Amino acid sequence: MNNNLSRKNTPLANAKRSFLKRLLVASQIAIICSGAQAAGFSQLTVPDPGHKDLQIGVWYPTAKHAPSEPNTPFNQALALDADIEGEHLPLVMLSHGFGGWQGGHADTAKALAEAGFVVAAPSHTGNTFRDMSSTIDQWMLDRPRHISISIDFLRKQWRQAPALNQGQVGLFGFSAGGHTALSLIGAVPNMSKAIAHCESDPSEFICSEGFVAGMVTADMGSLPAEAWGKDPRIGAAAIAAPGLGIAYDKKALSDVSVPVQLWSTLQDKRVPHATNSLPIAEALQERVETHWIDNAGHFAFMVQQCTEKLKKFEPDTWDFICKDNEGFDRRAFHQSMNAEMVRFFKASLASQ
């Protein structure tokens, strides 16, 4: 992993080091999570009036032992529907990528749960691998709403709600989920910037696949800022390979005030680093902690589905999602990334 916070003698790097120092101080004076422990899991249904019910997976700390063999669709051994362990536990929401599902980042969810967080991941109805029924404008606006109604449900209707704290919530989003996260923390895309970029570089994935054109057809540029779904309960966001990063500049991100941890792979062909993550980092300045990953592509942030079974029975899918550049160890990267996210959320949520 190449963390560009180690680069010296630039104003942006100095600002980032100052930001990290504040986070580390906060982590020393406020302990919000206990040490490593077992992880429980529950599958919940969240009512969404006027829409399909939302399915969410919830990982959480528990005193109950997990079985020795995997017992979940995402190949983890978890204590199903066990009682939660702990009090005043912080909540972190996960938002999967385009056409993904709730189990797409199960390793990150489990790592956070073992560190004392409650982690909830919705399968974004209308934009999952089983259900791609939503139009571009629908899923872009539905996704932040899914996160917000899930927070409402977990805090008010979940049987284990009393164990949650009522402070601010963490959020992790990958790819389209990165765009979701940006919307939830107050970013408003600059459609003129996105259109101009697609005119100058129509080969970029989000342009060539018609996403920006679909947003133009739906007249999303005329939406008021509040339509994008900012939720003031979100107190920190970890964002990986943010989709539609081409639409964000300093003005588009001016209402973002929470700590952001930004991840980007330098060989990403779907969400190219130079036109997406890098401009966001430059615009956010002292509000962002960056992690630039050498020798890796877009799907390096997904590991749970990369099993020997997938490699044997669906080799084309394996090559598309799981094949890495020589010398890149995806599982080792995830261990490091998950540890960094645990640290980030402990520190940033404790400081608020």
Image (cartoon, rainbow, N blue to C red):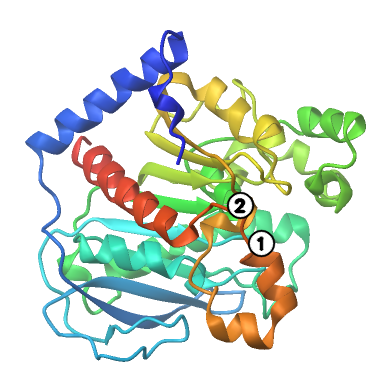
**x and y percent of residue 270 in the render?**
72, 49
Q: Which mark is residue 98?
A: 1
Q: How far separated are the C-alphas under marks 2 and 1? A: 7 Å
User: Mark 2, residues whose alpha carbon is within 10 Å: few (<14), some, or many (≥20)?
Assistant: many
Q: Is residue 224 visible?
A: yes
Q: Position of residue 215 (x, y in %)?
A: 80, 47
Residue denoted by label 2: 175
The amino acid pointed to by label 2 is: Ser
Residue 212 in view: no
- The disc placed on residue 113 is none
Q: Quadrant of the C terminus?
A: top left
Q: Is residue 121 left or right of residue 254?
A: left
Residue 100: percent from left, percent from top: 61, 69
The residue closer to the viewer here, 122 or 144, is 122
- 192 vs 280, nearest the viewer: 280
Q: Which residue does the image show at 53% across and 79% down from the upper left?
A: 307
Report the residue at 25% width, 43% height from top. Answer: 349
